[in-house]
């Protein structure tokens, strides 16, 4: 992951114009370098699961053909899992009497996770186990699926180090509340939260670019104001305040992961308040204007930020979950070895 910036430059097409799934599949799956960094490596699964990348690619391409929403769904799952507590698949765990009473999946920040994307992760898990690849975690699968979905949508190649295990505990409410900003957060709060996780202003601006694809729940627009009153009025009229109703995040190219998101912000057409807040910091505002006309620059920095997020440290007892949504039996998790504690990348 430390060399992810160089890898991003090699592909540069992050979340740009959607490509035909069949054509994208024909182009081949993302190849990975083999150098090791820390306790994780890019090629850790290459020996005992050589078909892992292709299994993931095939399943993601199939799902995306039927439902373009899985791309943004995977991105949101990746961010909401990794940003608060590192990439440990803790967000995937369904609440159970075996765990603490905390129900992070039910917090407002995590409501409306894309069911198709969640089901896709489990389908990949099943296919990987059918291929006798037992030591592949749901956390690694989520990262690989997200990366392939981005590339299939026209995005760049960026590296993710693999070799994680899955947390045996669900995501904690305090971390969700602390590290997943509200849709009406001010720029100072966004900067503060990202800095607390080791991300700078460039990372914040780049990761916000994920809003170039996907939809948001209509109640998230309640606090949206701005100079382009006509635009604010238009999206609110088209978006009743129900959690079941959605509004596209990029009103120009909603199904393409491109750099139009930044042009929309410059034009006053950012959908969320947090999108428009990017203009309230001079350094980030300058990036927004640059990326509005320079797709490759945005793709490069987005890939670096995604790779950086995948390196966030994790910790605590862990396992290779057979079902991504459920902890393995108590018998299997009681005698965890030191290797069972997810190490920091």
Image (cartoon, rainbow, N blue to C red):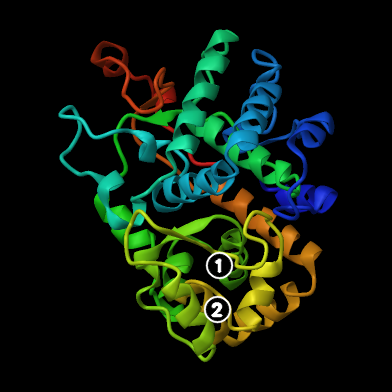
Q: Which residue is mark 1?
A: 204
Q: Is residue 29 left or right of residue 72?
A: right
Q: Secondary structure at mark 1?
A: helix
Q: Is residue 308 left or right of residue 238?
A: right
Report if the CB atoms under discs 1 and 2 are less than 8 Å apart.
yes
Residue 324: image location, x then y, percent: 41, 26
Callout 1 crowding tier (Cα within 10 Å): few <14, some 14–19, many ≥20: some
Residue drawn at 75 percent across, 30 percent down: 34
Q: Secondary structure at mark 2?
A: helix
Residue 232: image location, x then y, percent: 48, 81
* Residue 262 in which image quadrant: bottom right
Residue 14: image location, x then y, percent: 73, 52
* Residue 113 in which image quadrant: top left
Residue 54: image location, x then y, percent: 71, 23
Residue 40 or residue 134, whichever sits in front: 134
In the image, residue 77 above or below residue 133: below
Q: Decide if residue 244 is in sight here.
A: yes
In the image, residue 255 above or below residue 271: above
Q: Which mark is residue 278?
A: 2
Circle nearer the N terminus (1, 2): 1
Task: For marks 1 and 2, give the one nearer the viewer.
Answer: 2
Q: Which mark is residue 246?
A: none
Most distant residue in the bottom direction? 227
């Amino acid at each position: 992951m430390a060399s992810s910036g160089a890898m991003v430059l090699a592909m540069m097409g992050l979340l740009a114009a959607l490509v035909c799934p069949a054509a994208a599949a024909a182009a081949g799956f993302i190849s990975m370098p083999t150098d090791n960094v820390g306790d994780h490596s890019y090629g850790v699964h290459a020996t005992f699961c050589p078909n892992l990348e292709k299994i993931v690619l095939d399943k993601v391409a199939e799902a995306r053909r039927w439902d373009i929403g899985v791309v943004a769904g995977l991105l949101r799952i990746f961010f909401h899992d990794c940003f608060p507590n590192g990439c440990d698949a803790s967000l995937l765990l369904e609440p159970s009497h075996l765990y603490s009473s905390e129900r992070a999946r039910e917090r407002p920040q995590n409501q409306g996770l894309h069911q198709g994307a969640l089901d896709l992760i489990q389908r990949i898990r099943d296919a990987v186990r059918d291929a006798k690849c037992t030591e592949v975690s749901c956390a690694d699968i989520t990262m690989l699926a997200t990366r392939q979905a981005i590339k299939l949508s026209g995005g760049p190649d960026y590296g993710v180090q693999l070799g994680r295990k899955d947390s045996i505990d669900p995501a904690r409410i305090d971390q969700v509340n602390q590290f997943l900003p509200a849709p009406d957060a001010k720029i100072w709060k966004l900067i503060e939260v990202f800095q607390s996780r080791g991300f700078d202003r460039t990372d914040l601006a780049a990761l916000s670019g994920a809003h170039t694809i996907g939809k948001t729940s209509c109640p998230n627009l309640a606090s949206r104001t701005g100079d382009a009153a006509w635009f604010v009025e238009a999206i609110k009229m088209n978006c009743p305040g129900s959690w079941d109703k959605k509004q596209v995040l990029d009103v120009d190219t909603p199904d393409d992961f491109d750099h139009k998101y930044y042009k929309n912000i410059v034009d006053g057409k950012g959908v969320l308040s947090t999108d428009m807040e990017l203009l309230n910091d001079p350094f980030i505002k300058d990036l927004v204007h640059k990326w509005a006309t320079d797709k490759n620059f945005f793709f490069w920095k987005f890939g670096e930020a995604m790779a950086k997020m995948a390196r966030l440290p994790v910790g605590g007892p862990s396992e290779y979950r057979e079902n991504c949504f459920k902890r393995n039996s108590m018998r299997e998790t009681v005698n965890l070895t030191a290797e069972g504690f997810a190490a920091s990348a």
